[in-house]
């Protein structure tokens, strides 16, 4: 059975921190592949993403193209509406019965895992890989047992990059070179994304 890691998020834009978290999970947990699935509308974030879905998907395709075990998947964008992980996991299990799936989540998301839509049923479909930064250890003791038992932790190097910061830097006229891959940097500049 293939072991697939799922990286969900808006990827607005995808940056080196996302790629490093995926690589960390891939190696630490012996995954066969990591699939990046841009959300249509994340349930725990208010407001629309800065770039449209097609642009976010294209940036994910560009950023993952050189890695033979990374793949961009448009499942949530095709489905539209609020992107609940439960719905995605259910669809993936139906489409790929020969695969097992693990959601890769950052340390900031581990503590809100119990707020995820239908989290108890979700935990029956997938496992979770919590990627911690050295200075942001998760407090897993607060999680219900059924989530804690399905969670493994992996430590990744400290990297202080966020999509929010990248959008703010662009809006302020600063460079985002070296925060994203060269291809994504060129795509953002060509499309004029995140400018005022």
Image (cartoon, helix red, strand yellow):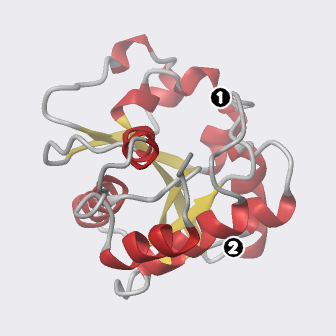
SS at circle 1: loop
Density class for disc 2 (Cα within 10 Å; few <14, some 14-19, many ≥20) is few
Asked whether residue 47 appears in the rendered view, the answer is yes
- Quarter holding residue 73: bottom right
Residue 10 in the image: above or below residue 106: below
- Quarter holding residue 182: bottom left
Which percent across, then down, holds residue 143?
46, 18
> Upstream in the sequence, badge 1 or badge 2?
1
Q: Is residue 139 left or right of residue 75?
A: left
Residue 71 in the image: above or below residue 82: below
**Residue for point 43% across, 43% down:** 105
- Farthest-out residue, top: 142
Density class for disc 1 (Cα within 10 Å; few <14, some 14-19, many ≥20) is few
Which one is nearer the viewer's eye here, 143 or 84? 84
Which percent across, then down, holds residue 15?
37, 58
Give the labeled residue for mark 1: 44
Asked whether residue 3 appears in the rendered view, the answer is no
* Real-space CA distance between mark 1 and mark 2, rounded to the nearest whole angstrom: 28 Å
Give the labeled residue for mark 2: 97
**Residue for point 74% across, 66% down:** 75
Which one is nearer the viewer's eye here, 157 or 183? 183
Q: Nearer the viewer, mark 1 or mark 2?
A: 1
CB of mark 1 within 8 Å of CB of mark 2? no
**Residue for point 51% across, 70% down:** 60
Query: Number of labelled discs?
Result: 2
- Quarter holding residue 64: bottom left
């Amino acid at each position: 059975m293939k072991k697939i890691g799922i990286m969900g998020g808006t990827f607005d834009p995808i940056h080196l921190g996302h790629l490093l978290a995926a690589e960390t999970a891939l190696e630490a947990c012996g995954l066969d592949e990591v699939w990046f699935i841009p959300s249509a509308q994340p349930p725990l974030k208010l407001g629309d993403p800065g770039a449209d879905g097609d642009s976010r998907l294209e940036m994910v395709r560009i950023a993952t193209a050189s890695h033979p075990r990374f793949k961009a998947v448009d499942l949530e964008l095709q489905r539209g509406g609020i992107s609940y992980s439960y719905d995605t996991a259910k669809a993936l299990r139906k489409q790929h019965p020969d695969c097992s799936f693990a959601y890769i989540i950052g340390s900031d998301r581990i503590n809100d895992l119990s707020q995820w839509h239908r989290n108890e049923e979700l935990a029956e479909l997938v496992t979770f890989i919590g990627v911690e930064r050295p200075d942001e250890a998760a407090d897993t003791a607060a999680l219900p047992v059924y989530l804690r038992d399905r969670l493994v932790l992996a430590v990744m190097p400290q990297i202080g990059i966020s999509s929010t910061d990248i959008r703010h830097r662009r809006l302020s006229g600063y460079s985002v070179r070296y925060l994203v891959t060269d291809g994504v940097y060129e795509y953002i500049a060509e499309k004029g994304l995140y400018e005022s």
